[in-house]
Image: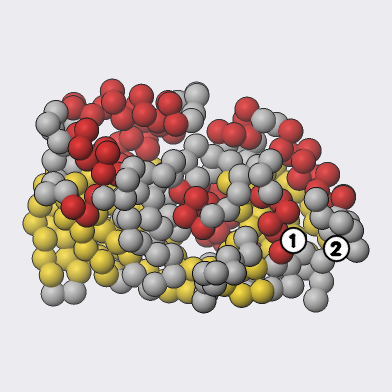
Amino acid sequence: MHSRARFIFNPHSGHNARNPWLLQRAREFIAEHRLDASVVPTEHPLHATKLARRALDDGCDLVVAIGGDGTMNEVATALVGTPATLGLIPCGSGNGLGRHLGLPGPGKGAFRALLAGHTRLIDTGVADNHPFFNAMGLGFDAEISARFNALSTRGFTAYARTIWRTLFGYHPADYVIRCGDQVLRSPGFIVAIANSDQYGNDCFIAPHARVDDGLLDLTVIRRLTPFNVLPLAERLFTKRLDGSPSVTRLRAAAFSIERDTPGFIHTDGEVRPCGAQIEVKVLPASLHIAVPAPLRHAPETTTAPSPGLATTPLAVT
């Protein structure tokens, strides 16, 4: 079966802005393997969603996002519930979903992985009608996303600096969180709901989360003080957050979150205004995504071969 592909390139994504050669690399990859594909750059926020929908109208069954989590979110939003597959060349500042799925970065085999034709069917989270595929958050989470998105310089160092400058001046709100028959009333410095296990940069906000279990993982960090900030940071990067007395963790298919006033949330790092009540739910098995071949000693049951990109007989290097 022949595959038609569309590559959507965000020139403003952190890695892409510093490495404009990636646009040319995408075009060379298409020419080298004689693919029925084209590459188009985004021109403004939310443009990637429009380009992805246009790709579906043009008969593309693989739509590749070349950018960070925001670009991934925009492209994937158009593909939810369709038979088309999302390809991801992760080149943003955090690359949370890419890291969770083991996707290689630019220059490390990211393009070649698309030729293998392996896909996974993963869940989609929806917060206040906004899809997310990695994580959404309220409180300090959303505040940092808003400040980080306004920076002219991206990357892990800029992200860490933004966190440090905001850390002790932020005051947590009070939340009422419902899931099923459970009701949690708590202050929340961070209230995060994750589909994958991490924000990005191997910062594990939901260490045991899986993208294909039909559930979302909620993490509440109640307060941050000069005494617990370093132990919590160490736990975030060593997958031991569940053992902290400052953290509450819940897992469910849907959450209802109430706060005193309207404010912001973020979905995959993109900041959105929202009311005082936020409904969050999962859409199980709703997005096809291209992934590297599964390891032979640990096969992934949700990974299946697909036709991949049709090429002429060429050696793939």
Q: Is residue 159 left or right of residue 104?
A: left
Residue 85 drawn at (x, y percent): 63, 66
Residue sitting at x 26%, y 37%: 233
Q: Element type at marker 1?
A: helix
Displayed quadrant of residue 284: bottom left
Residue sitting at x 50%, y 37%: 93
Q: Amino acid at mark 1?
A: Leu
Residue 169 drawn at (x, y percent): 18, 26
Q: Is residue 31 left or right of residue 232?
A: right
Residue 137 drawn at (x, y percent): 31, 49
Q: Element type at marker 2?
A: loop
Displayed quadrant of residue 185: bottom left
Assign the N terminus to one quadrant of the image. bottom right
In the image, is residue 158 above or below residue 173?
above
Q: Amino acid at mark 2?
A: Thr
Q: Residue furthest front?
A: 297
Residue sitting at x 33%, y 65%: 216
Displayed quadrant of residue 172: top left
In the image, is residue 213 above or below residue 311?
below
Q: Are marks 1 and 2 in contact (CB under 8 Å)?
A: yes
- For the question of whether residue 266 can be seen, the reply is no
**Dot 1 crowding, Cα within 10 Å, few <14, some 14–19, many 20+:** some
In the image, is residue 184 above or below residue 202?
below
Q: Which mark is residue 115?
A: 1
Residue sitting at x 59%, y 69%: 296
**Dot 2 crowding, Cα within 10 Å, few <14, some 14–19, many 20+:** some
Q: Which residue is mark 2?
A: 311
